[in-house]
Amino acid sequence: MSKKAIMTLESSRFTSYENSIPCYICDSSNNYDTELCHECSAPMALAHQAKAQGIKPDMVAVLGTAAAGKTVYLGMLLDMLTRQNNRLQLLARGAFSITLQQRTISALSNCEFPAKTPNEPDRWNWVHCQAQIPRRKKPVELVMPDMAGEAIIEEIDHPQTYPVIHSFLKKCAGVILLVDTNRIEQGSQEQNYFMMKVATYLSEMDKNKKQGKSQRPLAVVFSKADQCEVCFANPDNYARENTPNLWQQVQQRFANYGYFAAGVAGACASRLEYGTGQVSVPLRIEPRGIVEPFEWLLRKM
Ligand SMILES: Nc1nc2c(ncn2[C@@H]2O[C@H](COP(=O)(O)OP(=O)(O)O)[C@@H](O)[C@H]2O)c(=O)[nH]1
Ligand SMILES: [Mg+2]
Ligand SMILES: [Zn+2]
């Protein structure tokens, strides 16, 4: 018995080169009407916007383990900076750039934290925005994805498993490293070692070095610091005492770095949910230290 089926060859889509456009993240050629890059799953809207507007946005990476607070931090940052009367002003480019902020803020206003970021790159939220820095004539164009922690760990441990993260980190102009203060306070060394791996990975892929040090600015941000006043009081000191290996690596490998503390919740409670276990509930939203690391990074970039 033989079954017949018509299959479209993937390669046939690239025969008409006049209709192709390179992906902004990984440079591979895509058909003009593709929504996500066939190689790395980044939205092709980034490439179309860059081409149509004749701009080359800089890339900023927000890295951290799963549940370090990346989604909450990025969503809150965007919400704060897209409101008026800020020193630093952000303008979203493309409707897709608003989804992350929208999901985070609607969850927080319902006294919930946003849902976990899926591991599949085609389901990540990307942000393309224009930032106007005070006392700077020209605004800067930025691209920031909200990546999943598991995918970041996998790429750091086995380079090239996530082409999108690999290409993005190779090109990115600045990095925000979120370190989970809660887990440090629980006595776990996991954050210390993971961040050391990230610092090594970043500095080794960086070609632009002076005296052996990467020039790429790195903001180390202790997330969930609303749970730890000592950290807010002096993030520098906190890093030296609680993540000594990370402190050492950063000092040896990076020329431009800064330590910060950030927190979104004013108070949290915990609730037992059927099938999930203990779930943290934000009782108040009291963002602190959210804008400072980002503003520092933009000035250094
Ligand atoms: N207390 C407190 N908890 C936070 C904060 N940000 C995140 N969390 C907790 O950390 C969990 C994971 O946050 P999320 O942003 O999804 O982490 P991601 O996996 O790095 O994107 C949330 O569900 C909250 O329980 C914060 O600013 N303060
Ligand atoms: Mg997330
Ligand atoms: Zn791509």
Image (cartoon, rainbow, N blue to C red):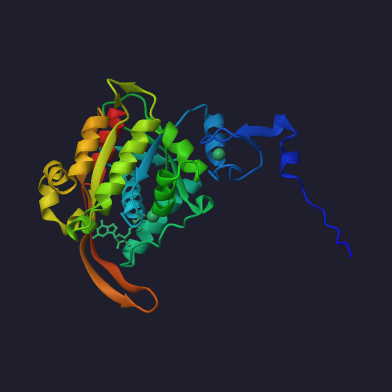
Q: Is residue 197 visible?
A: yes
The C terminus sits in image quarter: top left
Q: Residue at x 21, y 54 (%)?
A: 181
Q: Residue at x 46, y 50 (%)?
A: 125
- Left-right relation of 213 to 122: left
- In percent of width and height, residue 243 lies at 19, 46
| Picture quadrant of ligand 2 | bottom left
- In percent of width and height, residue 292 lies at 23, 41
Query: Which corner quadrant of the image does residue 240 belong to?
Result: top left
Query: Which corner quadrant of the image does residue 59 belong to?
Result: top left
Above or below: residue 21 compared with residue 127: above
Above or below: residue 218 compared with residue 178: above
The N terminus sits in image quarter: bottom right
- Left-right relation of 187 to 50: left
Question: Observer-nearest residue: 54 or 162?
Answer: 162
- In percent of width and height, residue 124 lies at 48, 51
- Left-right relation of 13 to 238: right
Question: Observer-nearest residue: 269 or 131?
Answer: 269
Q: Is residue 58 visible?
A: no
Labels in figure, total: 0
Q: Residue at x 12, y 46 (%)?
A: 241
Question: Observer-nearest residue: 164 or 158?
Answer: 158
- Left-right relation of 7 to 115: right
Query: Which corner quadrant of the image does residue 253 belong to?
Result: top left
- In percent of width and height, residue 136 lies at 30, 25
Above or below: residue 65 compared with residue 276: above
Q: Residue at x 35, y 45 (%)?
A: 63
Report the residue that reaches farthest toward the right: 1
